[in-house]
């Protein structure tokens, strides 16, 4: 949940694709926006205090987990 309580980041396999990270409004209005390109699974971890940045954990075969 973003600090503004108006946005949330989540991971989903929307549309039958591999799990990916998305950003959406908490009230369900507006588009659901993918975070980053298709690729390794990314799990939203936390927003910065001002809500401008989002830390993600990326699962990848070479290094297991990376914080991006």
Image (cartoon, grey):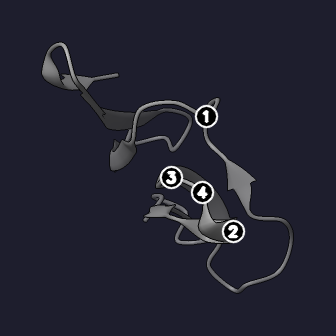
Looking at the rendered structure, which numbered label has been put on residue 38? 1
- Name the element at disc 3: loop
The quarter in which the C terminus is drawn is top left
- Circles 3 and 2: CB distance less than 8 Å? no
The quarter in which the N terminus is drawn is bottom left
Residue 7 in sight: no
Closer mark to the observer between disc 4 and disc 1: 4
Q: CA distance from mark 3 to mark 2?
A: 9 Å
- Circles 4 and 2: CB distance less than 8 Å? yes
Q: Position of residue 61 (x, y in %)?
A: 22, 23
Q: State the residue position of label 2.
A: 15
- Circles 4 and 1: CB distance less than 8 Å? yes
Q: Nearer the viewer, residue 9 or 15?
A: 15
Residue with the most extreme right position: 30
Looking at the rendered structure, which numbered label has been put on residue 18? 3
- Circles 3 and 4: CB distance less than 8 Å? yes
- Name the element at disc 2: helix
């Amino acid at each position: 949940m973003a600090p503004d309580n108006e946005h949330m980041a989540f991971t989903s396999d929307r549309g039958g694709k591999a799990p990916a990270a998305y950003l959406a409004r908490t009230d369900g209005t507006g588009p659901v926006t993918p975070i980053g390109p298709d690729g390794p699974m990314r799990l939203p971890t936390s927003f910065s205090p001002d809500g401008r940045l989002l830390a993600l954990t990326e699962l990848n075969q070479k290094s297991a987990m990376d914080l991006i």
